[in-house]
Each structure stands twice: as structure tokens, then as C-alpha cells.
Image: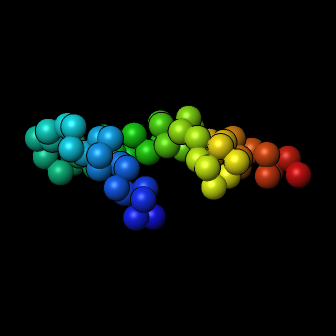
Amino acid sequence: MESFFKTLKVERVHQVRYATRTHARLDLIGRIEGFYNSRRMHSAIDYQAPNQREEQLKAV
């Protein structure tokens, strides 16, 4: 989890200036759901996106 939050901060939080906490929360939720869970490859699961891996596990 520490690696995840570090990457999220480097790739997004430190690159964007948010007007409010609500804007930040909405942006980060969108980033996690739209990028991390659907497209970003993870070495711990054989370089697959989490959503892709989840679908594989459901098929078994």
C-alpha cells in the first residue's frame, strides 16, 4: 500500500492543484478507478491490470 500511495502522489497529487478537498477526492477516485484498476499493469499479478486479473479469476 505504501508503494501505491507514493506512486499516486508522484503521478497525480503533486501534479495537480485542487480547489477543495472534494475536488481532490473526486479526482483521485476517478484516477484509481479509471487508470489503476483498469489499465495500469502490476508486477505482483503477472503484469496484468487488476480488473483483467479479476475477470480471469472469475472465469476459473
Please provide percent x and percent y for residue 34: 47, 36
- Tell me if residue 3 can be seen: yes
Q: Is residue 5 above or below residue 29?
A: below
Q: For the point 48% across and 37% down, which residue is it?
A: 35
Q: Is residue 29 left or right of residue 21?
A: right
For residue 3, which quarter of the picture?
bottom left
Residue 28, percent from left and from top: 33, 45
1 vs 55, left or right, is left
Q: Is residue 26 visible?
A: no
Q: Residue at position x 66%, y 42% from top?
A: 48
Residue farthest along the left direction in this orientation = 19
Residue 56 lies left or right of residue 34; in this view the side is right
In the image, residue 26 above or below residue 6 = above
Q: Between residue 37 and residue 42, name the one nearer to us.
A: 42
Q: Residue at x 13, y 46 (%)?
A: 20
Judge whether 2 appears above or below 55 on screen: below
In the rendered picture of this protein, how many numbered marks are placed on residues? 0
Residue at the spot x=29%, y=50% of the render? 9
Image position, residue 24 (x, y; %)? 23, 46
Quarter the N terminus occupies: bottom left
Where residue 16 sits in the image (x, y, percent)? 20, 37
Colouring: rainbow
From the viewer's perspective, is residue 57 above or below residue 15?
A: below
Q: Residue furthest right?
A: 60
